[in-house]
Image (cartoon, rainbow, N blue to C red):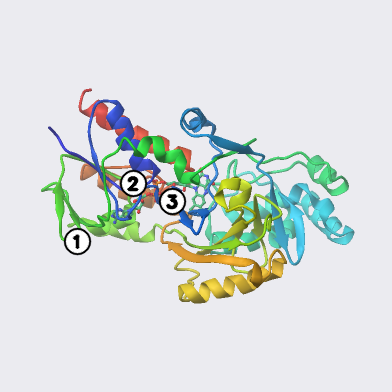
Amino acid sequence: MEKIVILGAGIAGISAAYHLKKAGISSVIYEQDDDYGGLCRSFQIAGFTFDTFAHISFDPDTVEWLENTTEYYVHAPEALNFDNGRWLRHPVQNNLIDLPVEERIGLIKGFIERKSAQGVCNYARWLESTYGDAFAHTYPFRYTRKYWTVEPEKLETRWVKGRMYEPSLEEVLRGAMSSQTQGVHYSREARYPKHGGFQNFLAFMAKECDIVYQKKVCRIDSLEKKVFFQDGSNTAYDCLISTLPINEVCTFLSDVPPEVMQAADRLDHTSGVMVSLGFNRPKVSPALWYYIYDEDIWPARIYSPDWKSPNNVPEGCSAIQAEIYFSKYKPLMRSPDAILENVIEQLLKLKLFSRDDIIVKDVRMRKYANIMFTPAIYSDRETVHAFLRDRNIQYAGRFGEWDYLWAGQSLLSGKRAAEQMTRRKGN
Ligand SMILES: Cc1cc2nc3c(=O)[nH]c(=O)nc-3n(C[C@H](O)[C@H](O)[C@H](O)COP(=O)(O)OP(=O)(O)OC[C@H]3O[C@@H](n4cnc5c(N)ncnc54)[C@H](O)[C@@H]3O)c2cc1C
C-alpha cells in the first residue's frame, strides 16, 4: 500500500488527513509540536484558556461542519480602537462622531478631496485615495507599521478587497453626526467553541488522524522519497503533502536552482508574540477585541478570552491576550521576559487593570504569522510552487499556498489537497 505523508498538524494538514480517510485512504501526519492545531492551537494555564492569537470563526463555508461537531457561541463581530487615551468604535472611518469636532472636520475634508483609487496598486496610495490623506496617515498608516511591520509603501493591494471597509461619503457623514451606525464587519457573526478554546473546532477531524508528534522536518530527499527529522529518524513516502512554509521547504531540499532559492528568500512574512494575562476579577476588557494605534505601545491588537467563552477563565476572573508583530524589517530584539514586562507596563496605559489584578502571565512566539504582500509575492510564489510541483510535493494551507487564508480557508485548502491525491490514485 502506498504511504501518504503529510507534514504539519495545523488545520490544513489535519483536514487533508481527515478527507483522505473519508475517501478510504490512510495517511500519517508528522508534526514538530506536541499537540495538533498549529496557529489554531489553544493552551491552558491555571484554569485559563488562551488561543494562538485572536482566533474566532468568521467563515460561512465551514459553519455547517463546525455546527455539527462542536457546541459554540455566536458573537456580533464588534471591535473597538484605542488611540492616545481614547476609545473609538470600529471602524473609525464610520464612527467619526467619537472624535472632537475639529478633528472630524479635517478628516471629512480629506475624504471629500480624495483622488480615485481606480488602478492604484500601492497600499499607501490606496489608503490615501480610499480614505483621504488625513485619515490614512492618522489611522491605517500607523496600524500598518504595527501589524505589517513595514511602511504601507512597501505593500501592494490585491489582498485588500473585502478586508478593509470602504465607506461612501454618506456613511462617513452619517457616522460623523450620529452614533447609530450600522456594523460593517465583513462577517455578520463570529463563532467560538463553548469549551476547549478555538482548537476544539478541529477536534472532530484530529481524532480521525494518525499524528506523530515532536518530529521536526529538517531535510527532504525528493528523489529517494524520504523525509528526515531533527531527532535523526526518517520516513519513506510515496506521496507527500506539505503544509510547512514553502520558503523553508526549499531549504530542506537539495539541488534547488538559484532563481528558486532567491524567490523563496524574498517571500516575506511577519512573526508574532502573544502576551497572555489572567486577572483575578471579571470583565477587564471593554470589547471582544480591540486595535491599538499608539506606536509606543507594542501590541497591535488585543482579544478577550472571557468574551469569547466564559469557560475560558475561572469563575470571577477575566483575561486578555496582546499580539505584537515583528519581522526582519522590524526586529524585536528582547528576551521573552523583557517583552512580557515591557508590554505589561505599556498596557497599564489603557487603564483596564492594575498590576495587582494579574494572576497569570505568559509569553510565547510564533515564527510565521502573516504573509507579507509585497509587489513581488505573486511571481516569487509561483516560481517556488512550480518547483515544488516539479518535485512532486503537494502544498496546502496558509504557508503552503503562501496566502492570507483564514482558518476555514486553510481547512478547505487541505481538503483540496486530499481530493487531488484521491483523484490521482483513481479512487
Ligand atoms: C494573528 C493571526 C490571527 C488569526 N486569526 C484568525 C481568526 O480569527 N479566524 C480565522 O479563521 N483565522 C485566523 N487566522 C488564520 C489561521 O490561523 C490560519 O489560516 C490557519 O491556522 C493556518 O493553518 P495551517 O494548517 O495552514 O498552518 P499552521 O497552523 O501554521 O500549521 C502548520 C503546522 O506545521 C508545523 N510545522 C512547521 N514547520 C515544521 C517542521 N519543520 N517540521 C514539522 N512540523 C512543522 C507547525 O508546528 C504547525 O502545526 C489568524 C492567523 C494569525 C497569524
- Residue 257 appears in the figure: no
Q: Does the residue labelled 2 lie within 8 Å of ligand 1?
A: yes
Q: Residue furthest left?
A: 224
Count of residue discs: 3
Helix, strand or loop at label 2? It is: loop
Q: Circle 1: is it few (<14), some (14-19), or many (20+) Cα within 10 Å?
A: few
Residue at the spot 37% in from the left edge and 36% down from the top edge:
205
Respond yes or no on whether mark 3 lies under 8 Å from ligand 1. Answer: yes
Name the kind of residue labelled 2 in the image.
Answer: Ala
Q: Quadrant of the C terminus?
A: top left
Can you see residue 334? yes
Residue type beneath disc 1: Asp
Residue at 26% in and 26% down = 423
Question: Residue 9: which disc?
Answer: 2
Neighbour class for label 3 at 10 Å: few (<14), some, many (≥20)?
many
Counting residues from the start of the chain, the first of labels 2 and 3 encountered is: 2
Q: Which residue is depicted at the point 43% across and 51% down?
A: 39
Dot placed on the residue nearer the N-terminal end, 2 or 1: 2
Image position of 74 with respect to 359: above or below: above
Q: Nearer the viewer, residue 24 or 114?
A: 24
Say whether disc 1 or disc 3 marks the residue closer to the N-terminus: 3
User: Element type at marker 1?
Assistant: loop
Is the C-beta of the residue carrying label 1 under 8 Å from the nearest atom of ligand 1? no
Q: What residue type is labelled 3?
A: Leu
Q: Write down the residue under mark 3.
A: 39
Describe residue 262's horizontal placement relative to residue 124 as left or right: left
Give the Cα distance between marks 1 and 3. 23 Å
**Does residue 224 sit above or below 151 in this rendering?**
above
Q: How crowded is mark 2: few (under 14 residues within 10 Å), some or many (20 or more)?
A: many
Q: Residue 202: x, y in percent?
A: 42, 40
On the rendered structure, is 384 left or right of 151? left
